[in-house]
Amino acid sequence: MKRIVFALTALLMIGILAGCGSPEAEQPEDQLDYEIAMVTDSGMIMDGGYSEEAWNAISAFGADEGVSHKYYKAPEASDSAYMGAISDAVERGAGVIIADGYSFEDVVYNAQEEYEDVKFVLIDAEPVNQESGEARTGKNTAVVSFASEQAGYLAGYGAVKEGITELGFIGESKTPVVMDYGYGFLQGADAAAIENGISVNVRYHYSSDEESAETLSDMASGWYEAGVGAIFACGSQVERPVIEAAELSEGRVIGAETEKSQMSDTVMTSAVKDIYGALRTLLEEYKNDEFPGGEVGYYNAENDGIWLDMENGKFENFTEDQYEAVYDRLKDGSVKVVKYDSGDIAELGLSNVAVTEL
């Protein structure tokens, strides 16, 4: 049976890495159980974002260690659908369940109590009861949290050092992770503007469910035509529309979460998180019966958990030495970046950056 499971797992890995067809079509449905499960929302999993990066880590670990694995995608964006996906995973033998994001904070809060024998991993969110507001990471849950504000800071700093004084920020939602990216972006741009003795303008927007991809693309096109040199696009739902606009307008794009240079030649750089490495470490700890339940693993510049993609970056003026210098300042704590919960943008104390919220 173990040989069958491993063979099926290997076939799954080959199919996904080859990129043939949809991920759902590559999953063997005749297998009885899967030890590692990933639950996702109703969007695409292979979207170049952290869902794909998380699944790549799970798939690679499963293939290397001979551990069965499967993902469960909720049919709709609702807590009941998310809990249904978790229940399906438990029924099919999941020993550890990875939930990818903010949408699962309330669901995991409840699931960690209902399924005490199952381990949970929540990425970039903590289990929170939506009614009471209580945050509690159970003994069977580990949280992976990234310093999005530091990654955003590097993006803003690098863009201004590159010589861009008209910038844009579009986040796919007004959630803590996206807001941290945005607040960090503004602070990094301000720091670089102060050093260069210049003024910078930033157009700033959070998207909503009512905005279509066409609406976002039109907005980005208008910004580029008005002189915006680069837009920091945070979230898979806004990246593609912004890239489409950039390709038509000769604009530039800054990606988020994972390295996005393969998406378009317009991608100048990406603010990256080590999702693969963090999840791989957790899975190894799970396998060795050392699962860090009840803990929040924080990944930032200090432990090389975030960075700005310089290897594939398309910079003409922002140098590697400048990048290393600002990264070291984040790493040693001499530069501290304020998170979204500090208050409104006005509370950031920006001196050389003017923000127009749209």
Image (cartoon, rainbow, N blue to C red):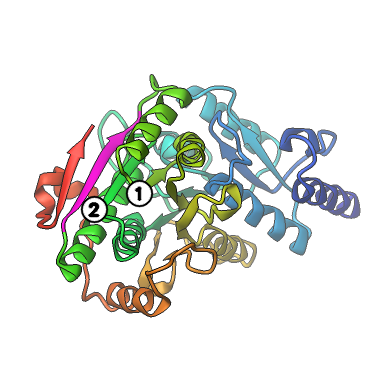
- Of helix, strand and loop, which one carries label 2? helix
Q: Nearer the viewer, residue 249 or 331?
A: 249
Front residue of 100/316: it is: 316
Q: Which mark is residue 186?
A: 2
Left/right of residue 182 with respect to residue 214 in the rendered view: left
Quarter that holds the C terminus = top left
Nearest the viewer among 49 and 283 is: 49
Horizontal and vertical percent position of residue 100: 51, 44
Q: Is disc 2 surrounded by few (<14), some (14 to 19) or many (20+) residues within 10 Å?
A: many
* Image vertical order of residue 127 relative to residue 2, above or below: above
Look at the numbered discs 2 and 1 and tell me whether their residues touch, using CB distance below 8 Å.
no
The answer, for residue 232, to whether it is visible in the render is: yes
The magenta segment is 199-207
Which labelled disc corresponds to residue 131?
A: none
> From mark 2 to mark 1, how far is it between C-alphas?
15 Å
| Crowd rating for badge 1 (residues with CA inside 10 Å; few <14, some 14–19, many 20+) | many
Q: Residue at x 43, y 71 (%)?
A: 304
Tell me what residue is drawn at x 75 percent, y 63 percent.
65
User: Compared with residue 66, is residue 42 higher up or lower down, i.e. above or below?
Assistant: above
Give the prevailing secondary structure in the magenta stretch. strand
* Circle nearer the viewer, 2 or 1: 1
Q: Amino acid at mark 1?
A: Gly
Residue 80 spot, x, y in % from top left: 49, 23
Of the residues shown, which amino acid type is indicated by label 2? Answer: Leu
| Residue at the image position 54 percent from the left and 64 percent from the top | 312
Report the residue marked by disc 1.
229
Question: Residue 94: x, y in percent?
Answer: 65, 44
* Left/right of residue 90 with respect to residue 158 in the rendered view: right
Query: Could you tell me if residue 96 is visible in this image?
Result: no
At horizontal 14% and vertical 67% (from top left) the residue drawn is 197
Q: Residue 165's x, y, as percent?
A: 25, 54
| Residue 202 covered by magenta stretch | yes
